């Protein structure tokens, strides 16, 4: 474990999750996903995407990645929940701006969690700006522990396979171009680059489609 953290720090920490996952495999997935769900702004989706890609290359096993991903997500969220429960809303409001940047963002998150309840915990799993704060917020707002746990597990069981599957799909869909990576040792920086390009292309396509729909003239009333 000490070797992992020493290496992790020397190689840029959370700035290079793909490097950590490619070198440390399941241990890196577990630690980074726990941190990302406990209130630390770690790019959890990048970790799981890279893990899925490494499943395609054969470096990691799908079943183990899914189990580790779900368990670490649940553990991390529950750590965040109990931190929020222990220190309360005042502490959260006092320190959250260091992470969120603007105090009003915390207020918006609190209102969202207050309105949606346990459903918000599941939805937050898919929202990068809210995911890492869902546990601390739920604890600070006094969500019942059992409701949070059920929602937390439900969200993790849905979210982890989707993101890991997306990483695997990148490798499968670009197999002809990425075959050298599958035959040899995966270059982690290349993995990250390919995944970033794929996600950027998907985001651009989604925005173009949404913009085209918004510009479509209203249909005449019948």
Image (cartoon, rainbow, N blue to C red):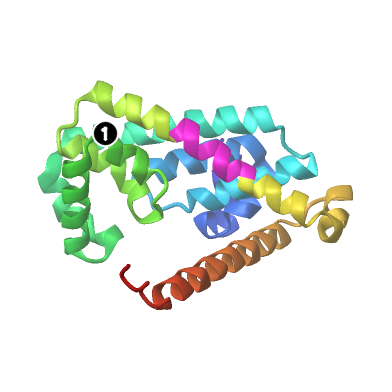
Q: Is residue 159 visible?
A: yes
Q: Position of residue 42 (x, y in %)?
A: 45, 52
Where does the magenta region start and end? 156-165
Left/right placement of residue 11 relative to residue 42 reads right
Compare residues 198 and 212 and report the one nearer the observer.
Answer: 212
- Residue 54 lies left or right of residue 90; in this view the side is right
Q: Is residue 147 above or below residue 43?
A: above
Q: Magenta segment: does it hold 149?
A: no
x then y, percent, for residue 26: 62, 35
96 sits left or right of 76 in the view = left
Q: What residue appears at the point 58 percent right and 58 percent down from the top-left corner? A: 16
The secondary structure making up most of the magenta span is: helix
Circle 1 residues within 10 Å: few <14, some 14–19, many ≥20? many
Q: Quadrant of the N terminus?
A: top right
**For mark 1, what is the residue?**
118
Residue drawn at 76 percent across, 57 percent down:
187
Residue situated in front as seen by the camera: 54 or 38: 54
**Foreground of the two, 179 or 32:** 179
């Amino acid at each position: 474990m000490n070797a992992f953290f020493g290496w992790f720090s020397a190689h840029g920490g959370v700035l290079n999750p793909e490097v950590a996952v490619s070198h440390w495999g399941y241990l890196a997935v577990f630690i980074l996903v726990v941190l990302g769900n406990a209130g630390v702004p770690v790019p959890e989706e990048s970790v799981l995407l890279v893990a899925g890609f490494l499943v395609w290359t054969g470096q990691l096993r799908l079943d183990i990645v899914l189990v580790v991903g779900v368990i670490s997500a649940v553990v991390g969220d529950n750590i965040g929940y109990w931190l929020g429960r222990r220190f309360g809303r005042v502490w959260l409001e006092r320190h959250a701006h260091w992470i969120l940047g603007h105090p009003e963002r915390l207020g918006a998150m609190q209102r969202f969690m207050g309105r949606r309840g346990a459903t918000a915990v599941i939805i937050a799993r898919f929202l990068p700006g809210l995911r890492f704060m869902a546990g601390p917020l739920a604890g600070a707002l006094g969500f019942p522990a059992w409701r949070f746990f059920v929602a937390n597990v439900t969200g993790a069981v849905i979210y982890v396979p989707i993101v890991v599957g997306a990483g695997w799909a990148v490798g499968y869909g670009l197999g002809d171009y990425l075959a050298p990576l599958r035959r040899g040792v995966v270059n982690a920086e290349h993995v990250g680059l390919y995944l970033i390009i794929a996600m950027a292309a998907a985001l651009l396509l989604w925005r173009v489609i949404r913009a085209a729909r918004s510009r479509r003239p209203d249909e005449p009333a019948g």
